[in-house]
Image (tube, helix red, strand yellow):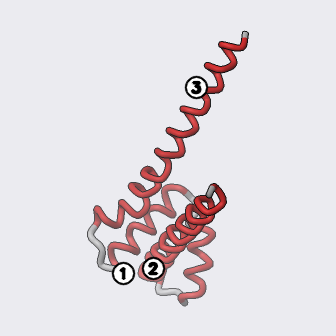
Amino acid sequence: MKATLFAVGYTGYLIFGLFQIAATASGIEHLTGLWRLMCWVGAMLIGWVPIVGTALGIYGAHTQWEWSLPVSAALFIGVPVLLFLPLLTVSVSAAIRRRTEAARAR
């Protein structure tokens, strides 16, 4: 069961990342007019830069894909936060449980 959930989560994360790379490549292509393959390479390199990659991705999703600005921003800001919150909750609760068990063992 754990392996299946891990595989599903990893596949979802991969698909989500491909959407972000595609949106960033679209933003670079729209701004520069470069060849599409060069834009994809640039998106993979620039996409890791937090503000620049996010801004280009939001711009690409908004201008090229004709998504609304809030939906474009949600792809880069909202969804990662929603994915991060459950992980944070599980991590914090596990840490509290370990500390509680360690305190009881003393």
User: What kind of residue is marked 2?
Assistant: Ser
Does 68 sit left or right of 102 as displayed? left
Give the labeled residue for mark 2.
26
Q: Quadrant of residue 47?
A: bottom right
- Disc 2 secondary structure class: helix
Instruction: Say whether disc 3 or disc 1 marks the residue closer to the N-terminus.
Output: 1
Establish if 18 lies above or below 73.
below
Residue at 36% x, 81% y: name it: 64
CA gap, disc 2 and disc 3 = 44 Å
Establish if 22 lies above or below 80.
below
Point out which mark residue 53 bears: none
Q: Residue furthest right?
A: 106
Give the labeled residue for mark 3.
96
CA gap, disc 1 and disc 2 = 6 Å
Give the labeled residue for mark 1.
64
Q: Nearer the viewer, residue 15 or 38?
A: 15
- Tell me if label 2 and label 3 are in contact, CB under 8 Å: no
Image x and y of residue 63, in percent: 33, 77
- Disc 3 secondary structure class: helix
